[in-house]
Amino acid sequence: MDSLQINQRLIMTPGPVLVDPRVSQAMSNQILGQFDPDFTAIMNDTMALIRQSFATKNRWAFPVDGTSRAGLEAVVSSIVCPGDSVLVPSIGRFGDLFVELAQRAGGVVHTVSAPWGTVLAQADIIAAIDQYRPKVVCMVHGETSTGRLQPLDKIGAAVHQYGGFLVVDAVASYMGTPVLVDQWQIDAAVGGAQKCLAIPAGITPITFNDRFAAEINQRKRVEQGVRTSQDHLSAAPLITSNYLDLTQLQDYWSPRRLNHHTEATAAVYGLHEGLRLALDEGLDARYARHLQVHQALNTALSALGLTIYGAGDHEMPMVTCVQIPAGLDGEAFRSQLLAQFGVEISSSFGSLQGKIWRIGTMGYVAQKPFILKFIALFGAALLQAGVPVDLKAGLDAVLDAFAPKSAPQLRQVNA
Ligand SMILES: *Cc1c(COP(=O)(O)O)cnc(C)c1O
């Protein structure tokens, strides 16, 4: 068999995304044993980087091995006991995923929802909290399926009035727009790898506070083979997952170094390097870059002659939703765009399927050369498909958007 031949792609989806070559390089380092002091030092550094990335002082900040869904499932299945009241404000597909995860954990789930493409008013969420007094509120910050950024800075305080916990899916927004865990009083937050952090999928940074840790540790049961006389057997309902049991993961990510799973050391190298690059860039600069690129893309798509879906209405600054031109088969076009031009964009889900495409500008691709190349190829593909777009106007819009704001004036020099 031949070795793998990977074709060049320009991935402009809301994940997975192109990876900075420096991350790939870090991941190709020699494997270390998971209890090697060299490696546990890297673990501790990675925890410090995760804390900074979430703007938190939480002691507990570590990665869960698995894609972001594993991080979400770890948090939900550790905090939700059978019979617990859970409120899920949902504005799209990933809100519905929280419903699913909480139900599987045995929670009694209440929802408050808004039509796809809109966000919920925080006052409406707080009214539902007052009504149900839930133990857990699960919310999505960046709802990737509809491209909406759900405001949630006031929810934590409302949940805490009744002694509850706020869990946030920040998978898509993390590292592309502020996720202020302490300031917004979030009890547990889940970030993403293959979104704005732009590292390969398979590892998920999370954080939770001491109050959350105390709650889940009432259910702690260290597995038999590694249990000591110090480990008491809890009478509370067991956390049903062993792999995603946060209480045992805590013991691996702290001086006890409990032998739980085999750590995905190469993934930790990648996470460490991705976070290092992000913090080196500066989080504020990184957020500003995502916003600038998002605005440039929106302007360019409009200049082509396309219509932005939900323009200006709580748009995520890393996902652009654009209406599929009337009469065009959106899926056939996407296939052509990939096969002929090497460019990948996304469709959507549910009621938005067939109506919009979603274009991601996450992490490494959120840079001028990629956006310029994208508009050139996407516009050309649309022209080929018979959609009369104004390609020059689209390209001008990108160039304009990235032109230095105070371009030096050319002064006429008199001879
Ligand atoms: C991508 C995404 C997920 C799922 O992440 P996986 O890595 O595919 O498991 C969850 N929530 C949101 C908001 C996402 O964008």
Image (spheres, rainbow, N blue to C red):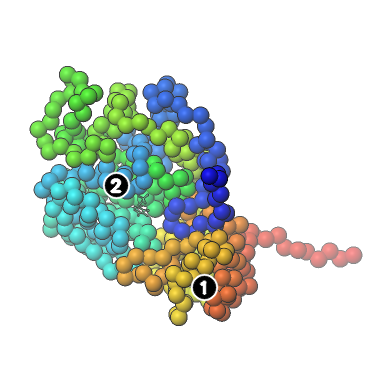
Residue depicted at 44% across the width and 29% down the height: 42
- Circle 1 sits on which residue? 302
Q: Label 1's element?
A: helix
Q: Alpha carbon of mark 2 to alpha carbon of mark 1: how far?
A: 36 Å
For image coordinates 72% across by 63% down, the residue present is 409
**In the rendered view, would you say 194 is above or below 405?**
above
Q: Nearer the viewer, residue 100 or 208?
A: 100
> With 42 as the anchor, is 349 left or right in this view?
left
Amino acid under label 1? Ser
Which of the two residues, 303 or 158, is positioned nearer the viewer here? 303
- Which part of the image, by quadrant, shows the C terminus? bottom right
- Please tell me the numbered disc located at residue 217: none
Whether the residue carrying mark 2 lies under 8 Å from ligand 1 is answered with: yes
The amino acid on which the numbered mark 2 sits, given as a three-letter code, is Leu
Residue position marked by numbered label 2 in the rendering: 72
Task: Say whether residue 54 is visible.
Answer: no
Give percent across and percent down for residue 55. 38, 42
